[in-house]
Amino acid sequence: MLPPVVFSLFTSEWQQIIHFSLLPFHFFPYLCTQMKQVRPKKNLGQHFLTDLSIARRIADTVDACPDIPVLEVGPGMGVMTQYLVQKPRPLKVVEIDRESVAYLKQTIFRGEGTPFPSPLTPIIEGDFLRMDLREVFDGQQFVLTGNYPYDISSQIFFKMLDNRDLIPCCTGMIQHEVAVRMASQPGSKQYGILSVLIQAWYDVEYLFTVEPSVFNPPPKVQSAVIRMTRNAVTRLGCDEQLFKRVVKTTFNQRRKMLRVSLRQILSAESLSVLAQTPFATMRPEQLTIAQFVEITNMVEKVLCANTTA
């Protein structure tokens, strides 16, 4: 509880006479509650986290990959940012919402007078999905984190995969259902396209569940915090684009055996090669990543043979 004298400072005149640097860091959450709040926008999928203890736990997930910069996606009103900025490493945030950008500039990123040890942390105003990630930290590797909008989280992770040489670690909060799919193993009903494509390059950890009640506005579903860390794979051992095509094609008909679903890629006559293997009667959720690689090589061999015939 703040003393009465501190509460007396939080008036409409306070911003004109009191400088942030006069307040210790632990007063910042109270300060933010006294400022005009950002209105959550449905079209941006905004659900602002209000529980500071959870915000700190999420921010601390980046510690698994120390000594490199951090890029936070969608900081909103900075509930996570206020903890990230205390860490002794470069930090940038990317925010598409102009109202949130203005709020951050008036609070966390106000300059040398902020209560934080890393003043003037850059705010990138724009769409993360349209960014050239090699320009963020001049080609240096970084940790990606954030409270990701549910409706574009998969697109964010596909962009991460396209830039996996830059992103050795990715953490953050997403929809519970998506987190479960990403961390699922073969044989599970949740195992799917995201599971295979991400686990081909990253080790996925489901860290903890977050209830809807700690958001404004509360989402209709649970959330979850995950961490993805680059594995030792540098080459899949097959054509990567064809691998993606095989994975997506088979999971789009996940209830069908491969001898049926792969007709979208191979002719019935060409599938005779696959029919001689155990894969013909298997369904995609039964396959490991290594088996998908093997199948991709088989498909490529048939396609090449048909091209030269």
Image (cartoon, helix red, strand yellow):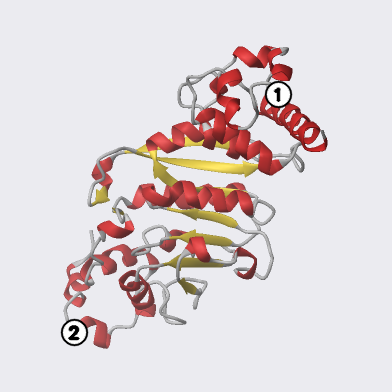
**Residue 247 drawn at (x, y percent):** 59, 33
- Assign a secondary structure to mark 1: loop
- Amino acid, disc 2: Glu
Residue lying at the far right in this picture: please name it: 308
- Asked where in the image residue 48 lies, by quadrant, the reply is bottom left
Q: Quadrant of the N terminus?
A: bottom left
Left or right: residue 139 compared with residue 21: right
**Residue 232 drawn at (x, y percent):** 74, 39
- Asked where in the image residue 4 lies, by quadrant, the reply is bottom left
Judge by depth and name the residue closer to the eye, 106 or 290. 290
**Residue sitting at x 47%, y 36%:** 207
Judge by depth and name the residue closer to the eye, 35 or 267. 267
Residue lying at the far bottom in this picture: please name it: 17
Image position of 301 with respect to 82: above or below: above
The residue pinned by badge 2 equals 13
Residue lying at the far front in this picture: please name it: 309
**Residue sitting at x 33%, y 64%:** 77
- Assign a secondary structure to mark 2: loop
Cα separation between marks 1 and 2: 77 Å
The residue pinned by badge 1 equals 270
Q: Are marks 1 and 2 in contact (CB under 8 Å)?
A: no
Image position of 247 with respect to 78: above or below: above
- Amino acid, disc 1: Ser
**Residue sitting at x 61%, y 62%:** 69
Q: In which quarter of the image is the C terminus?
A: top right
Q: Which of marks 1 and 2 is nearer the N terminus?
A: 2
